[in-house]
Image (cartoon, coloured by chain):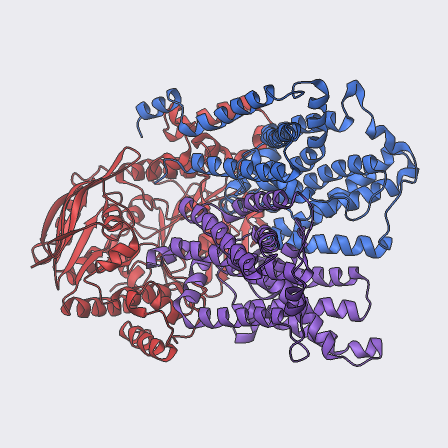
Chain colours: A purple, B red, C blue
C-alpha cells in the first residue's frame, strides 16, 4: 500500500485539501478577495478548539476516549475567571493545576481498574459541569481584566493572535516531542494493542496517567484562554465543542479504535474545522450546509474504517471478476 | 554456574493449582527446554518468570540475589526477555518501532538512523533480509511477525531469554534461522528457556530438558540422555488408553468443494465429503488447513470456487448462509471466537438452536431448560455445572461445550472443527473425540484440522495433508504418523 | 473451583453487594428525613422528570446490550421525530403516532444497518448522523420551529390518576422491553451478539440483523419519547432534544448496565432513571443548587460504573 493510501494520511489530506480549495475559491462566490483577516478568524477558531482537539485526540490515539475534556474546559475556564480577576496568571495556574489533577485522577482509575474510559470520563464530565455550575451559582461570570482580554486576541503579523500562536506552538511542540521520543511510539503501541505492548514491557499504566493528565492540562488551559478572550465564563459550554473536537480528530486521521494518528494529523483536522467555519461565515452560507458537509466527511471516515463494508466490497469485486 | 534459580515456586488460580514447588536452575550459556503436555504448567512458569504474574510461594533469584518480578518491566530490569506464546507485537507500528518497543536501552530520543541500522542487523540475523525496518508490521505475514518478536527478545542483551512456543507458526527454513540465532545468543553467555511442543526440535537444540507434569517438575536431565519416546513417557506418565476405532461406512455426499481457494492462504482444493465420515485436514499453522474450514464457515470474504451442500450451491463468505445450510463451525480460538464465556454452559450448548426452541419468536422456557439438561447429559456435564459460566470450566470441558452445541441438531450436516483439542488435557481430549465419533455415527460429516499425529491417526477416516497452501496427499487407508509428519513438514510424500 | 467455594459465595454476601444496598438505605433515610419527600406530589414530580429520559434510555439499553456502544444522536433523533409528530397532527393522533414511530425507527434503524452489517464504529457514525439530521432538519424546515397542525396531541398530556401519561407509558414499555429481552429469540441473540460478536458471527448467528433490529426498536422508543416531548412543548425545533443524549446514557450507566455489552436490562435502566431523579429531587428539596444536583448525578454514575466493573472482574485471573 502506498504511503498516501494509508488512512492517517489520506483522511486529513482529503479533508483539509477540500476545505482549503473551497476557502481559496471563496472570491468566486463573494466577488471579494480574501483578506488576512479571514485567515486571522480561521486561526481564532483553531485557538478556541485546538487545545480540546489535542486533549481528545491524544487519548484517542492511545485507544481511549476522554469525554471529560469539555467538562475540564468549562471548569478550568471558570477557575481562571474567578481567581484571575486581579492576577490572570494566578487564575491560569489554578486552572492548569485543576486540569492536571482531574486528569491524573481519571488516568489512575482507568489504568488501575483497566476500565473503559468512555463511561468513566462521561461521569467525570457530568460531575465537572455540576462543579463549574456550583462555582458560579449557575450563572455566567464576567472577567473584568479588559487588558488581558484585549491582549490575547491582539493581531500579530496580521493573521495570528497570541492565543492562536500559542495553540500552534503547543501543536508543534507536541508533534516534535511525540515524533522524536519513545512516547509517540508507545502511545500508538498501547492504542494499537494494549496487551502486546504490556508484554513487550511498555508501562501502559504510567503512560495512561500521563496522557490523561496532559489531556486535562490542555483542556483546562484552553478553557482559561478562551474565557480570557471572551471576557466571561460560561458554566455550560454544551456538547458542541466536544463533538467538533471529535470530528477534528477523526478528520485528522485518528481512529476511535486507537493506534493510529499523529499530532500533525490532529493539526490538519483542526485547520479543517477552522477554515470550514470561516468559509461558512464569509460565504454567508446557512449553518446547515456546514453540518451536512461534516456529515459527509464523517461518512467517509466511517466507510474507511468499517470492516464489514470492506468485506462487502471485497465480495463485490470477487463477483465481478 | 547457575544464573537463575527458582525454588519452590507455586501458583493457584481460583483454587486450581497451576504449578507447585517448581525447582529450576538455568545456567549462563545453556539452552534449557521446558516440556510438558497441555496444562502441565509450562505457561504459568513462563508467566511467573517474566513478571506477568506473582507467585503464591517460592522465590526467584538472579545471580544468587532474590528478585521480585511484579511487572514485565521488573523482569526486564532483572534481565529477562520474553517471546510470549501469543504473538505480542503491534501491527500498526513499523518493524523498527516494534523492535524498540519496551527496550530499556532504547533511550528517550529517537535517533532514526541508528535505530534503523540496528533493526537491519537484528532482521538479518533471523533471515528477514527482505523486510525493511520502516515497513508497517501489518504488511508482514504471521510467521514474519513472529520472527520480528523473536528478534526483539534476542536483541535486548538480556541475561535470560524465554521463548514460549517460538516456532509454532514458522516454516522449517524460518525455524532454522531461529535456532542459529538462539545458539549465538547462548554462546554469548545468555541463558535461554525454550518451551516447545516439537520434541525433535527440543532434543536437537537444547542442552538440558525439564519436564513438567500436573504442575510439578518430573525430571531435569541432559538432552543427550533423552530420546523422543522417553520424553513422551515423562510428559504423559501413564499413557491413556485410546478408544477403539470404529470406521463408519461412507454415506452419500453432503459437501462438495470444486476448485476452492482463498488467495494467499490455499489454492485449488477439491473434495467430496460424505455423511458419517470423519475427514482430517492435516497441516501445520500456515499450511492453509485452518483456512479451508474458516472459508467453508463463511469467514473468508475472498473465498473463490464452488461449494455445494446437499446438492445446493452455498453462498460463500456468508456465515449465516453456511449455518443455514447445516454447516456448524468450531473455531480454534475458543475464547475470542468461540464460546460466550460469561454465559452458562447450558446457554452455550443452545447457542445455535435458539430459533428451533421457540415458537412465534418466543423462547419456551421449559423446552429451553429440558434441551439444555439433555445436551449437558449427552456431553457429560454434571447437572450443577450447567448453570456455571462456561469461562470457569477447564479447557477440556469448554471444548466439550463448544463441540456439543453442534450435536443432536437436526439441521447439522457438516461439522467443521478447527484444531478441536488445542489447549485440552488428555482426559478432555478423549471426551471430545468421543463426541465427534458419536456425531459421525449419527450421520454427520466431520471435517477437522489438526497437527497432532495421534489425533490424526486415531480419529480420522480420511486424512488430507496440506503444506503451504496446497494439498500434498490424500489417505483413505490407515496411515502411519511419520508419513503424515513428513508430508506436513516437507510438502512431499515420503519415499 | 470446588463446590464448597461456590456455596460459600452464595451464603456470604460480597462486599460489592453490600454497597448498593447500603447506598439505597442511606438514600431512603435521607429522603424520609427530607420534608415533603414522601408526599404524593413529590413522587409525581420525580416520575414525570424521569419518564422521557427513561423511555429514550430503554431504547439506548437495547443498543448498549447489543455491544454497539451508544448513539450520540439521541437528541437529534428525538427532535426530528417530534417535529414530524407535530407536523402531521392534522391527520389525527393515531396516524401521527404511527408516522412518528416509523420515522424514528427508520432514522435510527438506518444507522443500525450500517453498524450491524457494515460494522461501522457507532460513535463516529452517530456523530455523523447527528450532523446530518440537524443539517437536514434546518435545511428543509428553514430553521423555524414546527407548530402542531392539529390538536390530537393534547391527549398525550393527560394525567389519569394524577400521573402524566408518559409515566404509565414508561412503566408499560419497561415491562415490554424486558419481556422482549427475556423471552424472545431476538433478546437471546442480542445478549449473545453483545457479549462476543466474533463468536456470534462464527456460530452463524444473524449478527447484522440482530443489531439492525435493536437499533430499529431503539429508534421507535426514541420516537415515543419524542411524541410526548413534542406534545408537552407544543412546538418543536432541532434543539428540542437538549441534553437528552447524555441524560439517557447516564441513566443506562447508573442502572448498572456496562457499556461493553452483553449484559443489562430494561429494569436496570428504569432503576437508574429513578435513582438519578430521586437524588436530584432530594437535593432540590433540601435547597441545593442545580450545580450540586448535576455534580451528584455524575458521582452516582461514576460510583455505579466502578462497582459494576469491580463485580464483573472480581475473581478473574
- Front one among B33 and A203: A203
Q: In the figure, A121 relative to A295: above or below?
A: above
| Nearer to me, B282 or C139 | C139
Inspect this view and state whether residue B305 appears.
no
- Where does the image place residue B332, in percent across and percent down from the top left? 40, 48
Please determine whether, in this image, residue A219 is positioned above or below residue A172: above
The residue at 54%/54% (across/down) is: B307
Q: Is residue B239 left or right of residue B392?
A: left
| Nearer to me, B274 or B163 | B163
Residue A9 in which image quadrant: bottom right
Query: Residue B311 vs residue A293: left or right?
Result: left
Residue B6 at x, y percent in the picture: 14, 49
> In the depicted view, which residue is nearer to us: B314 or B160?
B160
x and y, in percent, of residue C73 in the image: 69, 48
In which quadrant of the rendered image does the C terminus of chain C lie? top left
Residue A142, percent from left and from top: 68, 54
Which quadrant is home to the N terminus of chain C? top left
Residue A286 seen by the camera: yes
Is B392 positioned to the left or the right of C277 in the image? Answer: left
Amino acid at each position: 500500500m502506498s504511503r498516501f493510501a494509508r488512512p492517517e494520511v489520506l483522511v486529513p489530506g482529503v479533508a483539509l485539501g477540500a476545505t482549503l480549495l473551497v476557502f481559496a475559491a471563496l472570491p468566486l462566490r463573494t466577488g471579494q478577495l480574501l483578506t488576512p483577516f479571514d485567515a486571522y478568524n480561521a486561526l481564532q477558531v483553531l485557538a478556541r478548539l485546538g487545545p480540546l482537539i489535542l486533549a481528545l485526540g491524544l487519548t484517542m490515539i492511545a485507544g481511549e476516549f476522554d469525554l471529560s475534556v469539555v467538562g475540564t474546559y468549562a471548569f478550568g475556564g471558570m477557575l481562571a475567571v474567578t481567581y484571575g480577576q486581579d492576577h490572570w496568571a494566578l487564575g491560569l495556574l489554578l486552572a492548569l493545576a485543576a486540569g492536571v489533577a482531574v486528569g491524573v485522577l481519571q488516568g489512575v482509575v482507568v489504568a488501575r481498574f483497566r476500565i473503559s474510559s468512555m463511561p468513566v470520563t462521561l461521569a467525570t464530565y457530568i460531575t465537572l459541569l455540576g462543579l463549574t455550575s456550583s462555582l458560579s451559582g449557575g450563572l455566567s461570570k464576567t472577567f473584568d481584566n479588559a487588558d488581558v482580554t484585549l491582549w490575547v486576541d491582539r493581531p500579530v503579523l496580521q493573521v495570528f493572535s497570541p492565543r492562536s500562536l500559542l495553540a500552534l506552538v503547543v501543536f508543534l511542540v507536541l508533534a516534535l516531542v511525540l515524533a522524536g521520543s519513545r512516547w509517540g511510539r508507545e502511545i500508538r503501541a498501547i492504542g494499537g494493542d494494549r496487551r502486546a505492548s504490556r508484554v513487550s514491557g511498555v508501562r501502559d499504566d504510567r503512560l495512561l496517567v500521563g496522557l490523561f493528565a496532559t489531556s486535562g492540562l490542555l483542556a483546562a488551559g484552553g478553557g482559561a484562554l478562551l474565557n480570557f478572550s471572551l471576557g466571561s465564563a460560561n458554566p455550560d459550554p454544551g456538547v458542541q465543542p466536544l463533538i467538533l473536537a471529535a470530528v477534528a480528530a477523526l478528520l485528522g486521521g485518528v481512529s476511535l479504535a486507537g493506534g493510529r494518528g499523529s499530532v500533525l494529523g490532529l493539526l490538519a483536522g483542526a485547520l479543517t474545522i477552522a477554515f470550514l467555519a470561516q468559509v461558512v461565515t464569509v460565504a454567508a452560507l446557512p449553518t446547515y450546509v456546514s453540518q451536512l458537509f461534516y456529515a459527509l466527511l464523517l461518512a467517509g471516515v466511517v466507510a474507511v474504517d468499517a470492516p464489514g463494508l470492506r468485506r462487502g466490497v471485497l465480495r463485490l469485486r470477487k463477483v465481478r471478476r | 554456574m547457575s544464573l537463575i534459580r527458582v525454588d519452590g515456586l507455586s501458583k493457584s488460580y481460583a483454587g486450581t493449582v497451576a504449578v507447585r514447588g517448581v525447582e529450576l536452575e538455568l545456567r549462563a550459556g545453556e539452552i534449557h527446554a521446558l516440556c510438558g503436555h497441555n496444562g502441565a504448567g509450562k505457561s504459568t512458569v513462563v508467566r511467573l518468570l517474566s513478571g506477568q504474574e506473582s507467585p503464591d510461594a517460592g522465590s526467584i533469584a538472579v545471580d544468587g540475589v532474590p528478585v521480585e518480578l511484579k511487572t514485565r518491566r521488573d523482569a526486564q530490569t532483572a534481565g529477562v526477555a520474553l517471546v510470549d506464546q501469543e504473538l505480542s507485537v503491534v501491527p500498526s507500528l513499523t518493524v523498527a518501532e516494534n523492535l524498540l518497543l519496551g527496550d530499556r536501552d532504547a533511550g528517550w530520543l529517537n535517533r532514526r538512523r541508528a535505530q534503523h541500522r540496528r533493526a537491519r542487523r537484528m532482521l538479518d540475523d533471523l533471515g528477514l533480509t527482505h523486510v525493511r525496518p520502516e515497513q508497517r508490521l501489518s504488511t508482514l505475514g504471521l510467521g514474519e511477525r513472529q520472527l520480528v518478536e523473536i528478534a526483539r527478545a534476542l536483541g535486548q542483551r538480556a541475561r535470560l531469554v524465554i521463548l514460549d512456543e517460538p516456532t509454532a507458526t514458522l516454516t522449517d527454513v524460518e525455524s532454522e534461522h531461529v535456532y542459529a540465532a538462539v545458539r549465538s545468543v547462548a554462546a554469548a553467555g545468555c541463558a535461554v528457556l525454550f518451551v516447545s511442543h516439537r520434541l525433535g526440535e527440543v532434543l536437537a537444540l537444547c542442552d538440558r530438558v525439564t519436564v513438567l507434569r500436573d504442575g510439578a517438575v518430573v525430571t531435569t536431565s541432559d538432552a543427550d540422555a533423552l530420546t523422543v519416546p522417553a520424553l513422551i513417557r515423562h510428559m504423559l506418565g501413564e499413557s491413556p488408553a485410546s478408544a477403539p476405532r470404529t470406521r463408519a461406512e461412507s454415506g452419500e455426499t453432503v459437501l462438495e468443494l470444486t476448485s476452492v481457494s482463498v488467495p494467499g492462504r490455499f489454492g485449488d482444493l477439491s473434495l467430496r465429503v460424505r455423511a458419517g465420515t470423519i475427514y482430517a485436514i492435516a497441516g501445520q499453522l500456515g499450511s492453509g488447513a485452518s483456512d479451508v474450514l474458516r472459508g467453508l464457515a463463511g469467514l473468508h470474504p475472498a473465498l473463490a470456487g464452488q461449494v455445494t451442500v446437499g446438492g445446493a450451491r452455498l453462498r460463500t463468505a456468508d456465515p449465516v448462509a453456511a449455518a443455514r445450510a447445516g454447516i456448524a463451525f468450531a473455531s480454534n480460538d475458543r475464547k475470542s471466537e468461540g464460546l460466550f464465556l460469561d454465559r452458562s454452559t447450558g446457554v452455550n450448548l443452545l447457542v445455535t438452536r435458539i430459533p428451533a426452541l421457540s415458537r412465534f419468536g418466543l423462547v419456551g422456557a421449559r423446552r429451553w431448560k429440558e434441551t439444555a439438561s439433555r445436551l449437558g447429559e449427552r456431553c457429560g456435564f454434571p447437572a450443577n455445572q450447567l448453570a456455571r459460566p462456561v469461562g470457569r470450566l477447564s479447557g477440556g470441558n469448554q471444548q466439550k461445550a463448544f463441540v456439543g452445541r453442534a450435536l443432536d441438531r437436526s439441521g447439522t450436516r457438516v461439522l467443521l472443527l478447527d484444531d478441536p483439542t488445542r489447549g485440552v488435557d488428555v482426559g478432555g481430549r478423549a471426551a471430545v473425540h468421543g463426541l465427534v465419533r458419536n456425531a459421525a455415527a449419527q450421520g454427520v460429516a466431520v471435517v477437522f484440522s489438526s497437527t497432532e499425529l495421534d489425533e490424526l491417526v486415531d480419529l480420522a477416516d480420511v486424512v488430507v495433508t496440506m503444506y503451504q497452501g496446497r494439498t500434498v496427499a490424500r489417505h483413505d487407508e490407515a496411515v502411519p504418523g511419520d508419513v503424515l509428519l513428513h508430508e506436513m513438514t516437507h510438502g512431499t510424500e515420503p519415499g | 473451583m470446588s463446590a464448597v467455594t461456590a456455596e460459600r459465595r452464595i451464603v456470604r454476601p460480597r462486599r460489592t453487594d453490600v454497597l448498593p444496598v447500603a447506598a439505597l438505605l442511606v438514600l431512603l433515610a435521607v429522603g424520609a428525613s427530607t420534608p415533603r419527600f414522601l408526599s404524593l406530589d413529590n413522587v409525581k414530580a420525580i416520575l414525570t422528570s424521569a419518564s422521557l429520559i427513561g423511555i429514550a434510555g430503554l431504547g439506548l439499553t437495547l443498543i448498549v446490550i447489543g455491544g454497539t456502544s451508544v448513539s450520540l444522536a439521541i437528541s437529534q433523533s428525538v427532535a426530528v421525530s417530534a417535529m414530524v409528530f407535530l407536523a402531521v397532527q392534522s391527520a389525527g393522533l393515531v396516524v401521527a403516532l404511527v408516522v412518528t414511530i416509523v420515522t424514528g425507527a427508520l432514522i435510527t434503524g438506518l444507522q443500525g444497518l450500517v453498524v450491524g452489517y457494515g460494522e461501522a464504529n457507532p460513535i463516529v457514525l452517530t456523530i455523523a448522523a447527528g450532523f446530518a439530521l440537524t443539517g437536514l432538519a434546518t435545511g428543509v424546515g428553514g430553521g423555524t420551529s414546527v407548530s402542531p397542525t392539529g390538536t390530537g396531541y393534547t391527549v398525550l398530556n393527560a394525567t389519569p390518576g394524577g400521573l402524566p401519561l408518559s409515566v404509565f407509558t414508561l412503566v408499560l414499555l419497561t415491562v415490554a422491553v424486558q419481556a422482549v429481552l427475556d423471552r424472545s429469540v431476538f433478546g437471546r441473540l442480542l445478549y449473545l451478539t453483545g457479549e462476543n460478536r466474533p463468536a456470534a458471527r462464527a456460530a452463524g448467528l444473524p449478527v447484522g440483523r440482530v443489531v439492525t433490529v435493536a437499533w430499529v426498536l431503539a429508534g421507535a422508543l426514541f420516537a415515543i419519547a419524542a411524541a410526548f416531548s413534542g406534545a408537552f412543548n407544543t412546538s418543536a425545533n432541532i434543539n428540542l432534544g437538549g441534553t437528552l443524549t447524555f441524560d439517557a446514557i447516564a441513566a443506562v450507566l447508573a442502572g448498572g448496565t456496562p457499556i461493553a455489552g452483553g449484559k443489562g436490562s430494561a429494569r436496570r435502566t428504569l432503576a437508574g432513571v429513578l435513582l438519578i431523579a430521586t437524588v436530584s429531587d432530594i437535593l432540590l428539596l433540601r435547597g441545593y443548587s442545580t450545580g450540586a444536583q448535576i455534580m451528584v448525578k455524575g458521582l452516582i454514575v461514576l460510583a455505579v460504573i466502578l462497582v459494576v466493573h469491580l463485580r464483573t472482574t472480581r475473581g478473574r485471573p
